[in-house]
Image (cartoon, grey):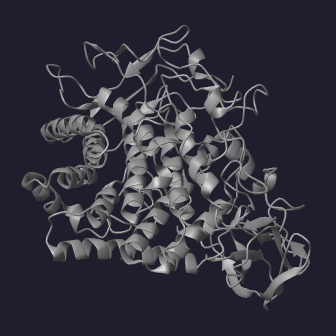
Amino acid sequence: MLMFPHVHRRRPTNRRTPSAGTASAGRRGAAGLLTAVLLTGGLALAPGAAGAPSAAADPAAATTPVRVNQAGYLPDGPKRATVVTTATEPLNWQLRSASGATAASGRTVVRGVDAASGEATHVADFSLFRKTGAGFVLVVDGWSSAPFDIRADLYDGLRSDALAFFYHQRSGTPIEASLVGPAYARPAGHLGVAPNQGDTNVPCQAGVCDHTQDVRGGWYDAGDHGKYVVNGGISVWTLVDSFARAKRAGTASALGDSTQRIPERGNGVPDVLDEARWELDFLMRMQVPEGKPYAGMAFHKIHDAAWTGIPTRPELDPQPRELHRPSTAATLNLAATAAQCARVFRPYDAAYAKRCLSVARTAWTAAKANPELYAPDSDSTGGGPYNDTQVTDDFYWAATELYAATGERAYRDAVTSSPWHTSADALTPTGFNWADTAALGRLTLATVPNGLPASDIRRVRASVTAAADGHLATMAGQGYAVPIPANGYVWGSNSQVTNNAIVMATAYGLTGQQRYRAGVLESMDYLLGRNTLDLSYVTGYGDTYAKNQHHRFWAHQYDASLPNPPAGSLAGGPNSGLQDPVAQEHLTGCAPAACYIDDIGSYSTNEVTINWNAPLAWLAAFTAERPRG
């Protein structure tokens, strides 16, 4: 069986300090990566056509130069397509119904070369067409797009499926056939039933601690069996924030009790919070108990002592499990998410909210006492290191959540004295991630009522709308309208897209201005097929979609008895770093936006993770909402 370590994925790709401006260690110059596109005089052959660059080795590569959101469009939203062509004059387009009748027509707009894909592009805009239907195609100069729908309930299914990903990823509980179907059902993993050595009594790595700890539960992080506090932190925060946002908008019932197929449905608690609690309980179990060295800190991670092969179902994993040394970053993730829990869970389970706040306070105090305990980047055997040597942003995030939950002066002072509170680098063009969390604090302060001076709140909110305007400007300068720059195609680029779309959606919530909602919808267009590969990165959505993501038990490509990932699973997306052998073999010379292959072995372009699906679930809930009156 193949062994695919994940060490590369765990490294911060765009770590910044408040004084670092827009520098980024993970950036690559776009010019050296652009590839020539084989043109036929008029419309271009898509990547994957005969004679195309080596990036086209992907069998799922584009087959038409007319690129659309393959799932479809909302009747009241933007409806744009990208057309790959060298034509220097506008081309005629027709929107045709399933019967072949012309429903609308117009002329393309010449956009020129798109830097990220290297393709000459036009844009066809049929936004004025607002009728509904299924099976539309867009025809340009004899070429037809993939078929798509136009309907108001377009994202209702994705809202459920993207969130269901987390039940599928649960550790320490059986995944029930009655909830997910027989293909995805499995016994509980890592509860000590042979051959598992379990997560209920886990020792530390040698020299780290002298006790064992019950750290069962939580979500498997990605395609491996590891559980990592810093990645769990941003993921659970995003799910809880999704509910908090919907509640502010008056639309939380869509995420409420009995809206998901999970064991907790019908318990009186919104299902999205039930799902988040599964991870929150695990995060709190990772706290070092009183009386032990580093009491109150959080262990950084728990995973196998050595990498398992693919495929390996969780209940068949025979590896010893180990706790890894506590870290300041993990402890602050615990403080932030437990404080958020205290605020959002309070109306539904006051006792649980009280427990969360106690854990958060303890973690904050422990982190303040140990402000520079970093996870080493060398700790990458059996699991990724998730190393992070700058945690001032994590202190800021944790302080904002504790202040939002309590209103206490000590936490307010920690917020206002942080350099991140006024830094222009909290919200950046390339987005935020598990290693760059200042944006989470900024978004909380912008949206949750708090006692900061009105002028401070106005400045914080203005920083969110300014960042959203920056993303819109980036999109306007591209052929595919993606909210990341051409040098932003790093490991997990699709999560950078989704996180920047969350910033735009938050700006919409603050202002009601439709341009921000339009930016979110066009970001979804990119994920669902309006891209250089003419491919939906979301399993089960679109005419052609990713289905061989890197995963140890959704491994149909290696074992026909195992399933592909379930519907609603988001692939990591193009990564110009090419940090796995499959990508290196097939994608050398690729344009940044084409550095992707739907192969289970390409862990640097095609893995699934909780911190990529969490913002997808956030956005699916947002886009599924019917517009304000």
Q: As rendered, which of 460 and 37 lies closer to the eye?
A: 460
Residue 291, quarter of picture? top left
Residue 302, quarter of picture? top left
Which residue is rendered at x = 58% and y = 42% of the image? 608
Which residue is rendered at x = 55% and y = 13% of the image? 318
- Residue 534 against residue 387 in the figure, above or below: below
Which residue is rendered at x = 64% and y = 28% of the image? 178
Q: As rendered, which of 419 and 461 lies closer to the eye?
A: 461
Residue 454, quarter of picture? bottom left
Lateral position of residue 406 relative to residue 481, left or right: left
- In the image, farthest residue toward the bottom: 89
On the image, the x and y values in percent for residue 70 come to 74, 62
- Residue 125 against residue 74 in the figure, above or below: below
On the image, the x and y values in percent for residue 281 come to 35, 31
Lateral position of residue 582 relative to residue 459, left or right: right
On the image, the x and y values in percent for residue 183 come to 71, 29
Is residue 285 in view?
A: yes
- Residue 130 against residue 385 in the figure, above or below: below
Which residue is rendered at x = 40% and y = 19% of the image? 322
Is residue 386 in view?
A: no
- In the image, farthest residue toward the left: 409
Figure quadrant of the N terminus? top right
Count of numbered circles in the view:
0
- Residue 407 against residue 320 in the figure, above or below: below
On the image, the x and y values in percent for residue 493 come to 55, 56
